[in-house]
Amino acid sequence: MVPFGLLAGFAGGREVRITELDETGFCFRIRKKDSANIASEELKVCFYDIENSGYRELEISEYDIQRCDAADTDLQEFYVKYKVNVKEKEYAKAVQRLLYQYNRYIHLKLEEDDSTLAESMTGYPGERDVVKCRSLEEQMKIWQEELKTGPERERKTLLEAGLGRESRSLLKNAPVELALEIDCPELYQAYLRSSLTDFSEIFAEKSMGICSSLIRNRQVPDRLYIGNQFCHLLFPGKELLFQMLEKAAAEQVQITLVFSYIREYMLDQVQALLEEIDHWCEHRQICIEAVVNDWGMADLVKNGTRNVTPSLGSLLNKRKKDPRISFKKGDQRLFEKNNLNAGFYRDYLKEEFGIERFEWESCGYGQDFPVGKNSLHIPLYQTNTSQYCPLRAVSLNGERGAQKLAKSCPHYCAEHVFLYPEHLHMVGRYNSLFGIDMEVLKDSKLLERCAKKGVDRVVISASHTGEGYAFPLML
């Protein structure tokens, strides 16, 4: 019962399914049409080494093989089963090592908590998994100090590193747009009450590290992202939305509307709203963008509007993101690419939905940005999203597991967040978990390198305040 990912077998270059394993040999099955001359084929077994995070390939040269599927008469027309008796000592040692590592993992999984398991397997600092802060403000003070002093490594302060000069050079001399993300009622109202210059200063005060300098050096943004990628209840109401659109148009700032997934009951409402937005754009002879995080929404924008250009949102632009990813063993360069690095997929998105821009998040490791238009969101990156909001469940019912689909909400997230151990640099906001990329906040050269790799827009998200719920680590 060893998981498939820990063990793989090959016969004559074709992968076979290993069904039984011990120190004397193994059984495998193969498609019937591939079983001819199997006795003379070269056999190879690949054992996953958990400690070194890689496979060890072992060619089997001394063995006896015989067919053993007599009991599976009903399935013989589909596959053939063989038993291999291996005579090599190296094979027995490899099996012992695999079973020892896997048995140790099972015991840790059953007997210890997640922190101890991670500490034993990867060196993760499980002893630091204690929530010490009582509010997000308190936690953010710790993070701000970390940005200044860099306790994990020797660093110059941001000022000594020439942050202001580098950020000015990056956004003034490179063709990089600066956008601010307005994603909650608090910011919607703050934008309507303020001039664009004053709102930029308000936003800078809510931002961390390099983000504050980028905003202040640019003074006003080139673009506003209005809406929320992750919660379907945080998109502004129609009246409020058009007030912001009118204000942005008057201030001659570019507009990107941000939509989350679209629930079934919302389809007619969203379709009607898109039609009104399209008429508004046509009347003013402008075009706006719409970030889509749902394939149905992408189809609505493509076929139902003429003045709205879709962009692929973070929920559809999938990649592995986790604050603990630096502790993961193995070659982390494999995270740098995803399906958008395939040209045929980008061609499909363009032809099928008219999508040529992609929304990315700075998430703690280098990324290979594809050819095209790339927007980079800093410093927050989403790791988990639940349509059945856990924050609402705790606020309403006092229990995180008592989640139900909400069609309306008083926005508990305006006052409350989930807190996690500060060393993880993460926070639970509304219906999602977010990590904070501290590296991009410390070093403006990272943004400069991203600009050279194809990023033509930087989108800054504000760090919101809240009372905070101090819950145990739950990822």
Image: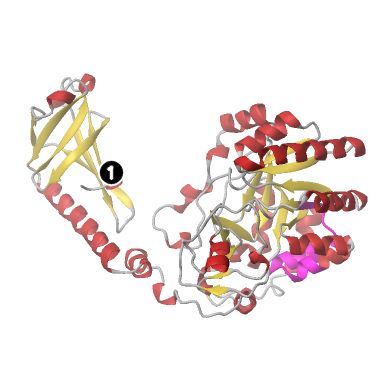
Q: Nearer the viewer, residue 240 or 108?
A: 240
Left or right of 180? Residue 384 is: left
Estimate the x, y position of residue 452 in percent, counting from the top left: 68, 49
Estimate the x, y position of residue 60 in percent, counting from the top left: 15, 38
In the rendered image, residue 220 lying in the magenta stretch gets the answer yes
Q: Which residues are magenta?
A: 202-225
Q: Nearer the viewer, residue 49 or 356?
A: 356
Residue named by callout 1 = 4
Q: Amino acid at mark 1?
A: Phe
Residue 415 against residue 180 in the figure, above or below: below
Label 1: how many Cα within 10 Å (few below 14, some 14–19, many 20+) = few
What colour scheme has been applied to the protein in the rendered image?
Answer: secondary structure
Estimate the x, y position of residue 212 in percent, counting from the top left: 75, 67
Residue 341 against residue 253 in the figure, above or below: above
Residue 391 against residue 362 in the figure, above or below: below
Estimate the x, y position of residue 237 in percent, counting from the top left: 77, 52
Residue 149 against residue 321 in the figure, above or below: below
Q: Is residue 426 visible?
A: no
Q: Nearer the viewer, residue 325 or 238?
A: 238
Q: Quadrant of residue 299?
A: top right
- The residue under the point 76% across, 42% down is 289
